[in-house]
Amino acid sequence: MKLILLFIKELRPKQWTKNLLVFAALIFTIPEITINMVYAAVAGFLLFSFVSGTVYILNDLVDLQLDRQHPTKKNRPMASGDLPPVVAVSAGSIILLTSLVTSYNLNIWFGLILTFYFFLNVAYSFYLKNVVIIDVMVIATGFVLRAVGGAFVINVPMTPWFIICTMLLALFLAISKRRHELTLIEQAGGTKGDYRMVLDSYSTRLLDEMNSIVTTATIISYALFTFTSGRTLNLMWTIPLVIYGIFRYLYLIHIENKGGQPDEILLKDKPILITVLLYTVLLILILMFF
């Protein structure tokens, strides 16, 4: 029983909130949603969650020695030595194979996206995470694949502006994550490359400059999306919430030295959580009644 609980923890269910992006296409389909589309979206969410969980196992296996030197990651099941790697890899392989087979039965294009998502993350774990700039772009691509996969699994088209907005917002989160890692290492007085090799190629100033560009582009792109999505122009009333959410995240990064785990911030920072909930409710109301 203990091994099962440790394995579930290794799958990092707390980070499955990232896979909620699968539901984005479903929400923007309001009011034409059918019960079958809801079932398909839920299935897509679960499959992305299971596959992303196996990716976390792979990441932890590759970074085992480095994680043991990290102030918080050393407590992960494999890094702490509580969960034998052979158990995690064996169970993860079964889950991965089952998830991919199921995804192809659900929708062949969704299956291809999920397969590409997995192999992209394999490439990231073994090489791309050490390539400056490419590393954060790969992380962002993972978010885009979730959003696109959510559209394919319910058979609805996606606008280019929505994909661009997703990519830019994901870049913002990925760059913020790197900045947080860099700050943690510098505060601890450690060597950047000892924890993550690519951090030797970054500086706080560079990451701040990158985030400034991405933040501006995200807000402009989202504003354009609300006017060109083909839906009601009343979507423009969600723009202030998007701006506040981004500004609040920047505040957490620069003032409270947070930003390493977006999923934790979503659940623990009340202003961010309230903003996301208000955005979702307002979006649904606008699409349903305006």
Image (cartoon, rainbow, N blue to C red):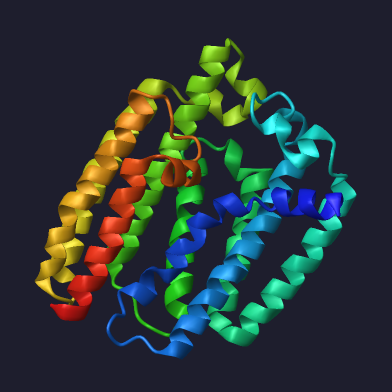
Position in image of residue 122 (x %, y %): 67, 53
Residue 193, compared with residue 153, is above or below; it is: above
Position in image of residue 97 (x %, y %): 75, 71
Q: Quadrant of the N terminus?
A: bottom right
Position in image of residue 28 (x %, y %): 30, 74
Residue 7, compared with residue 31, is above or below; it is: above
Quarter of the image for residue 195 reads top right
Frontmost residue, 201 versus 10 = 10
Residue at 77% of width from left, 43% of height from top? 61
Quarter of the image for residue 32 reads bottom left
Q: Quadrant of the C terminus?
A: bottom left
In screen coordinates, is 146 left or right of 123? left
What is the tally of numbered marks visible in this picture? 0
Residue 197, compared with residue 170, is above or below; it is: above
Position in image of residue 86 (x %, y %): 89, 50
Residue occupying the far top of the picture: 189
The answer to whether residue 59 shows anywhere in this view is yes
In screen coordinates, is 218 left or right of 40? left
The answer to whether residue 145 shows anywhere in this view is no
Residue at 38% of width from left, 24% of height from top? 256
Frontmost residue, 213 versus 236 = 236
Quarter of the image for residue 230 reads bottom left
Residue at 26% of width from left, 57% of height from top? 278
Residue at 82% of width from left, 60% of height from top? 91
Residue 174, compared with residue 44, is above or below; it is: above
Frontmost residue, 179 versus 84 = 84
